[in-house]
Image: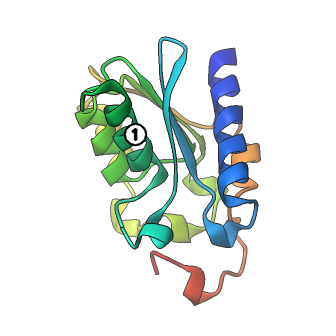
Amino acid sequence: MNEDDERWMREAIGLAISSKGTDPADTPIAALVVRDGVLIATGVNRTAEDCDATAHAEVVALRAAGAATGDMKIDGATLYTTLQPCGMCSFASIWAGMSRIVFGAGRADVHEMYFEDRHLGALDYIADAYKQDLTISGGVLATDCAALYYGPHDSVPDTEQANS
């Protein structure tokens, strides 16, 4: 973790709070695409608002980055996200040419509902299979990011559990 990573993660946390609030029920996940120290695009989780299972914050940010650059490939960029990305978002990052994924809270920091057990090894697989192309760093401001979500031992109503 470096100072730039902390700076950009603080910006992602701010985006999550300003766009979605601090209620974990509103899934305040945010992502940024940054290249050469310049913010290219942002995204917040919009799955419920858009009735779109693919509208994760990371995918929303990657779509916005493509629109901003006029290219689906944003080679050399970093994706910052407040929550460890799922397999779909990680693979989308690869297709978009990200060089790095930097996330805040990881699986162990939040309630199990944020991750499907079947995807337990997705990030490990990607980190190994694409190690020549992609660097993955987690735990940047993890405590601050985890505070946005239900904790590992919180009792979460079934109606709020997307992956149950």
148 above or below 123? below
The amino acid sitting under disc 1 is: Ala
- Tell me the crowding category of disc 1: few under 14, some 14 to 19, or many 20 or more residues within 10 angstroms, Cα based: some
Residue positioned 69% across, 26% down in the render: 6
For label 1, the SS is: helix
The spot of residue 59 in percent (x, y) is: 38, 48
Question: Residue placed at 33% from the left, 35% from the top?
Answer: 67
Marker count (numbered)? 1
Who's the residue at 40% across and 22% down the image?
77
Q: Within the image, what quadrant is residue 98 found in?
A: top left
Given residues 118 and 102, the one toward you in this image is 102
Q: Position of residue 114 (x, y in %)?
A: 52, 65
Q: Quadrant of residue 63?
A: top left
Q: Position of residue 122 (x, y in %)?
A: 33, 50
Quarter of the picture containing the N terminus is top right
Residue 2 seen in the figure = no
Q: Which residue is mark 1?
A: 64
Picture residue at 54% right of the left edge, 13% below the top = 37
In the displayed orientation, state which residue is furthest to the top: 36
Residue 56 screen position, x and y as percent: 44, 56
Look at the image and tell me whether residue 83 can be seen.
yes
Rendered image coloring scheme: rainbow
Q: Is residue 71 left or right of residue 162?
A: left
Q: Is residue 28 above or below residue 76?
A: below
Answer above or below: position of 112 versus 121. Answer: below
